[in-house]
């Protein structure tokens, strides 16, 4: 029976040091996967690796560096799953006030970083004839919201890239899908949710609350595993109903 078991498979999770990436890594490990963890802060990764146990590989660095992504894929070798969760949203300001540097920083990490890691992982998976790539978009890859122009543009690009890679690689056994989280309780969203915008956001969620980080892990395991063997090129929303209205 096709199921959610990832025993014997190697999963690379970027952005694994904190928040959603950390929760997803835990979920994949619980499903049996051997984990490879990437983020910019070694201490965060080593702390998680100690929790997940022997065999967990820590590779600190920036996904915005194409050379780093290629080096990771080479060191990992056999690779079954990539969940690319690394991303930033450092600005929350009106579009006319966004600087070129701020715009480029977000696109470099969120979109270029996704491309670099998907390309590096995809090459490995194509060589062996199979694998699952899960990118992480956002509800704002398809829905508008104030003061997040660069972030929304980067996530819309992630979804378009996901569809193209899915079409290109489907006949060679590599599936590519996107997760689109709504608002979750993480370090990245903490400041925003504590501001006056927090209540605006909560009112926009039919379930009436923001998500807990571990509520995204099940969806990631689904897309990573054989449970989704006939799913590719799709975006799975995990948002409490945000995009339903």
Image: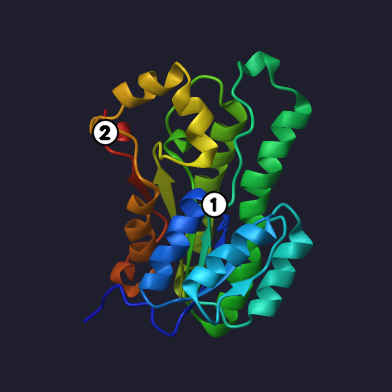
What mark, if any, has residue 222 been given in the picture? none
Q: Which residue is mark 2?
A: 244
In the image, residue 152 sits, relative to residue 69, either above or below, namely: above
Q: Is residue 181 left or right of residue 94?
A: left
Residue 136 versus residue 59: which sits nearer the camera?
A: 59
Is residue 118 at least partly visible in the picture?
Answer: no
Classify the position of the C terminus by image quarter: top left
Q: Residue at x 63, y 78 (%)?
A: 76
User: Are there few (<14), some (14-19), or many (20+) residues within 10 Å of tag 2?
Assistant: few
Above or below — where is 199 with respect to 82? above
Front of the two marks 2 and 1: 1
Vertical order, 174 against 156 (above or below): below
In the rendered image, the quadrant that contains the N terminus is bottom left
Q: How many marks?
A: 2
Q: Decide if residue 239 is on the left or right side of residue 157.
A: left
Q: Residue at x 46, y 24 (%)?
A: 194
Q: Secondary structure at mark 2?
A: helix
In space, the residues marked 2 and 1 are separated at their CA atoms by 28 Å
Q: Locate residue 66, reporting x and y percent.
A: 75, 59
Q: Which residue is mark 1?
A: 18
What percent of the width, then of the height, locates residue 42?
A: 68, 61
Residue at screen point 33% across, 51% down? 215
Q: Is 88 placed above or below 202 here? A: below
Q: Earlier in the sequence, mark 2 or mark 1?
A: 1
Residue 196, image quadrant: top left
């Amino acid at each position: 029976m096709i199921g959610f078991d990832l025993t014997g498979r190697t999963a690379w999770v970027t952005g694994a040091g904190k928040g959603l990436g950390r929760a997803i890594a835990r979920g994949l490990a619980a499903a049996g996967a051997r984990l490879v963890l990437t983020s910019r802060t070694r201490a965060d990764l080593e702390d998680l690796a100690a929790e997940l146990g022997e065999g967990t590989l820590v590779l600190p660095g920036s996904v915005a560096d194409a050379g780093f992504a290629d080096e990771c894929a080479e060191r990992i070798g056999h690779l079954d799953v990539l969940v690319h969760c690394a991303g930033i949203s450092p600005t929350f300001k009106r579009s006319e006030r966004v600087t070129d540097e701020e715009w480029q920083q977000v696109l470099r990490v969120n979109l270029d970083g996704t491309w670099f890691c998907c390309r590096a992982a995809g090459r490995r998976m194509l060589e062996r004839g199979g694998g699952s790539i899960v990118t992480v978009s956002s509800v704002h890859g398809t829905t508008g919201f104030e003061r997040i122009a660069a972030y929304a543009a980067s996530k819309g690009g992630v979804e378009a890239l996901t569809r193209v890679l899915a079409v290109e690689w489907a006949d060679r056994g590599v599936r590519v899908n996107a997760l689109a989280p709504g608002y979750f309780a993480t370090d990245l969203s903490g400041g925003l949710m504590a501001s006056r915008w927090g209540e605006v956001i909560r009112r926009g969620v039919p379930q009436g609350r923001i998500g807990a980080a571990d509520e995204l892990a099940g969806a990631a395991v689904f897309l990573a595993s054989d449970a989704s063997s006939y799913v590719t090129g799709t975006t799975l929303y995990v948002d409490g109903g945000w995009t339903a209205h």
